[in-house]
Amino acid sequence: MEYNYLYDVASKPFIYNSNNEITFSVDSKIVAANDQPQGGSVKVTFQTNENMVETDRYILQLKFKEVVLAEKPLSFNKSMSNYTVDLKSNVTVANGGMLSVDLYKISQHFIDFYAANSSNIKIDDINTKMVMNWTSPKGEIIVIQKPSNSLQVDVSVDKTLYSPGDAVNYEVTVRDRKT
């Protein structure tokens, strides 16, 4: 499968495959840190064409390295334009870094298997751990998350339990976005 990476003048990259039923873009390639207003949030906009199969299911993920920070199960209608999803991570990437926004299509084999074997769980409850071997990638966009402006303070002690009057040995580590 060949992908063409297109960029418009507003620097909103999106991935396009002429055989694809869906394309998507991000509002901004630079994402604020989680401790800032709107931090950790990526707005993803989708467009579908007449090739979209409305019963297909997708998983949208926000990842740091291979760690999934946030994900949403999705389904789409034919010929949708400007359908926006706000993908928000509650996990702080203290020093910032490269995040990826990944869209996966869940195979019909998994949906059939799931429907036959899961009477008490809704299809919208699926998650990556359940289906990564049952998906096909539809695209990826790399975004940069700015470093956090806050300090991270870690305090460790030598014992878990103390009695009144005991001496406490402790270690304090303070980190900022540069350390």
Image (cartoon, helix red, strand yellow):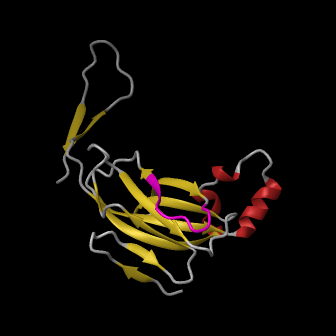
Q: Is residue 133 above or below residue 94?
A: below
* Snapshot quadrant of residue 166: top left
Q: Which residues are magenta?
A: 76-86
On the picture, is 24 further left or further right than 96? right
**In this orientation, which residue lies closer to the viewer: 45 or 82?**
82
On the picture, is 52 further left or further right than 161? right
Name the main secondary structure of what is drawn in magenta.
Answer: loop
Q: Position of residue 38 (x, y in %)?
A: 32, 46
Q: Position of residue 72 (x, y in %)?
A: 54, 54
- Which residue is outermost to the bottom? 2
Q: Is residue 168 above or below residue 22?
A: above
- Which residue is outermost to the left? 178
* Snapshot quadrant of residue 51: bottom right
**In this orientation, which residue lies closer to the viewer: 52 or 32?**
52
Quadrant of image for the N terminus: bottom right
Q: Position of residue 9 (x, y in %)?
A: 27, 74
Magenta region includes residue 52: no
Q: Position of residue 121 (x, y in %)?
A: 73, 47
- Which residue is outermost to the top? 164
On the picture, is 101 further left or further right than 27? right
Q: Which residue appears at 40% of the width and 45% of the height?
A: 90
Magenta region includes residue 84: yes
Q: Which residue appears at 31% of the width and 12% of the height?
A: 164
> What is the tally of numbered marks visible in this picture?
0
